[in-house]
Image (cartoon, helix red, strand yellow):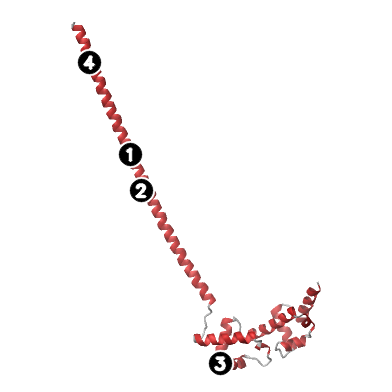
Amino acid sequence: MDTWLIVLIVISCVIVLGIIYYFVTKKSNQTEQNHSETVNNTNNKTEASTDNFSNFVKTEEDKKVQTLTQKNSITISNQEIIIEEPQLSINISSKTEKILLRKLELFEKNKGFIKKDINLSSLAKQFETNTKYLSEIIKTHRQKQFNNYLNELRVNYIVDRLQNEPKYINTKISYLASDCGFTSHSTFTTIFTQITNESPSIFMKRIKEERTN
């Protein structure tokens, strides 16, 4: 009887110890799992914070780059505006400048340059201004000295007529010179050659050959 009692007590102890071991192990595993989840959450938060910080830095850098680009664009635009609006080297009022430019445009449109007696003084008098002002306007807005400006207008006039008026191609060179305002045949030939890189005779010959072909 005593033997069975002892066996029963031993079995009961084993069962109790097993139950205790089970709960202790379960609690330990749960603690480790909680710890692991905490670590993972912490890592996730850290990664999220890192990503947010990186995005913030990238955004700020993009803003800076955009700002610099805008500033550069503004600078370039301002430079273009300066180039497009030539500045006079002498003090001429804006109103006077516009009036002289308008008169210069009419002079070109009406082909006033083919008159033989045109020079800087006579044109300034015609424009009701002085030679200094007129010379500055031409130099600034046409990028030429007066004589070069006048000569190019005359040669371009002849070139246009030779290219667009078939009958005009047979005109004598002396008449071409006189027609565009030159008083000297040789002067016309020299200036025509300088501007077109061809003498009047060679230019006219080439035009004839092109029309024939």
Q: Which residue is mark 3?
A: 130
Circle 4 sits in a helix, a strand or a loop, which is it?
A: helix
Residue 13 visible in the displayed image: yes
Residue flagged by tag 1: what amino acid is it?
Answer: Val
Circle 3 sits in a helix, a strand or a loop, which is it?
A: loop
- Gap between marks 4 and 3 measured at Cα: 130 Å
- Gap between marks 2 and 1 measured at Cα: 15 Å
What residue is shown at x 77% (from left), y 76% (from top)?
207
Residue 91 visible in the displayed image: no
Residue flagged by tag 3: what amino acid is it?
Answer: Asn
Q: Quadrant of the C terminus?
A: bottom right
Q: Which residue is mark 4?
A: 12
Q: Position of residue 50 (x, y in %)?
A: 37, 48
If you read the primary sequence from the N terminus, does the residue marked by circle 2 or circle 3 appear first?
Answer: 2
Label pair 2/3, CB-CB below 8 angstroms: no
Q: What is the number of the mark on residue 39?
A: 1
Q: Which residue is mark 2?
A: 49
- Gap between marks 1 and 4 measured at Cα: 40 Å
Q: Position of residue 71 (x, y in %)?
A: 45, 67
Residue flagged by tag 4: what amino acid is it?
Answer: Ser
- Gap between marks 2 and 3 measured at Cα: 75 Å
If you read the primary sequence from the N terminus, does the residue marked by circle 4 or circle 3 appear first?
Answer: 4
Q: Is residue 190 left or right of residue 2?
A: right
- Gap between marks 3 and 1 measured at Cα: 90 Å
Q: Quadrant of residue 11?
A: top left
Classify 174 as above or below 15: below
Say few, some or many: other residues with alpha carbon within 10 Å of mark 3 (under 14 / 14 to 19 / 20 or more). some
If you read the primary sequence from the N terminus, does the residue marked by circle 3 or circle 1 appear first?
Answer: 1
If you read the primary sequence from the N terminus, does the residue marked by circle 2 or circle 1 appear first?
Answer: 1
Give the tally of numbered discs: 4
